[in-house]
Amino acid sequence: MITGTPGTGKSEVAKLLGRRLRIRVVDLKPFLERAKVGYDEKRKSDVIDEEKLVRLFKGLEGDFILEGHLTHYLPPDEVDLCVVLTCSGKELRERLRKRGWSEEKVEENVMAELVKVCLGEAMDRGHKPLVIDTTGKGAEEVVEEIVAFISERMKKKV
Ligand SMILES: Nc1ncnc2c1ncn2[C@@H]1O[C@H](COP(=O)(O)OP(=O)(O)OP(=O)(O)O)[C@@H](O)[C@H]1O
Ligand SMILES: [Mg+2]
């Protein structure tokens, strides 16, 4: 699974990694829709039933790369590898502005990245993540780092 603040490059990296490893990529978004239980006006975000989300995840068969900013909700024992993508605030701001997002939404996400919300939540749930700083890198380079990590780990297991 690949998690990280919006704009850290999850979808881009997952797509390339999926091609490289010949493994299917599953996007979290449709699952979020199905696990939605309301809308928080104050936080301007959907309220997700975490247990329902995990149940939906568990229903998936076979091997896959799951990408999305709440994929770390999946329990560690269901996951072979948890990857957390990070990015400097400055570069993330530039990436998110390119999407045409409002300044408020951009800054909210830059702040979430600076305090490493996804990484903290992943570790709180017991994941032992591979953390990759994507600042100044292309998605291909990030994929190479993930592949190298997996190869090393497989060597150790033999
Ligand atoms: N090293 C990198 N890895 C991935 N994407 C990068 C990188 N550098 C720049 N980008 C660019 O950053 C932008 C954000 O990437 P992407 O849409 O994959 O993010 P995301 O994490 O999936 O965001 P969201 O959570 O909103 O779906 C894209 O325009 C992508 O081309
Ligand atoms: Mg994405």
Image: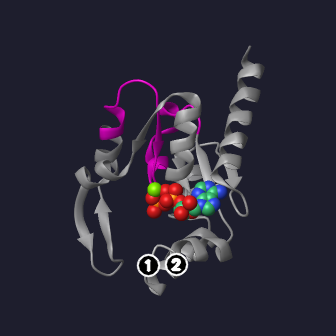
Residue 102 in the image: above or below residue 22: below
Residue sitting nearer the eye, 26 or 5: 26
CA–CA distance in space, label 1 to label 2? 6 Å
Is residue 28 in sight in this rendering? yes
Residue 108 in the image: above or below residue 57: below
Residue 40 in the image: above or below residue 36: below
The quadrant holding residue 44 is bottom left
Q: Residue furthest top?
A: 158
Q: Is residue 60 magenta?
A: yes
Q: Percent from the top left, x then y, of residue 147?
A: 68, 35
Q: Give the residue at mark 1.
A: 101
Q: Secondary structure at mark 2?
A: helix
The answer to whether the residue labelled 1 contacts the one labelled 2, judged by CB atoms less than 8 Å apart, is yes
Q: Give the residue at mark 2.
A: 97
- Magenta-highlighted residues: 56-81
Horizontal side, residue 34 vs residue 90: left or right: left
Amino acid at dot 1: Trp
At label 1, counting other C-alpha atoms closer than 10 Å, the crowd grade (few under 14, some 14-19, many 20 or more) is: few
Amino acid at dot 2: Arg
